[in-house]
Amino acid sequence: FKLTAEVLEKAITPKTKWLLMNSPSNPSGAAYTEAELRALADVLLKHPHVWTLTDDMYEHLTYGDFVFKTIAEVCWPW
């Protein structure tokens, strides 16, 4: 399972407080690409009342030439 920006946008309400993310996920190993994270960040930046908590403990367990990024790395404005 990987959350998409479209699904996230539809799920956020005024009562939404947190987005909890796990990437790469356990046990599947699914990880977000930089483009996928950027799309999620674009949604989250429109909703400053939603905080994000990420669990990146498996960042070194990726396959092939995949480059791991966190959502903080791709949405930092400078």
Image (tube, rainbow, N blue to C red):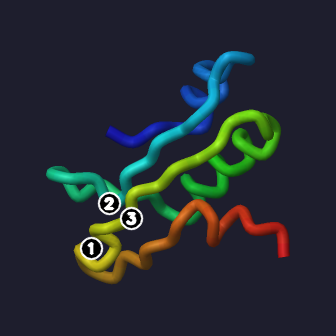
At 58% from the left edge and 30% from the top edge, which residue is drawn?
A: 8
Tell me where residue 78 appears, x and y as whole percent: 84, 76
* Front label number (1 vs 3): 3
Q: Tell me the CA gap for discs 2 and 1.
A: 7 Å
Q: Which residue is mark 3?
A: 56
Q: Callout 2: 10 Å neighbours few (<14), some, many (20+)?
A: many
Q: Tell me the CA gap for discs 2 and 3.
A: 7 Å
Q: Which mark is residue 62?
A: 1
Hey, which residue is sitting farthest left in the picture? Answer: 27
Q: Is residue 44 above or below residue 41?
A: above
In this rendering, position of residue 54 left or right of residue 78 = left
The quarter of the rendered structure image containing the N terminus is: top left
Residue 13 occupies quadrant: top right
In this rendering, position of residue 42 left or right of residue 4 = right
Q: Earlier in the sequence, mark 2 or mark 3?
A: 2
Look at the numbered disc 3 and give the secondary structure of its residue. Answer: loop
* Front label number (2 vs 3): 3
Q: Are marks 2 and 1 in contact (CB under 8 Å)?
A: yes
Tell me where residue 51 appears, x and y as whole percent: 65, 43
Q: Which residue is mark 2?
A: 24
**In front of the other: 18 or 70:** 18
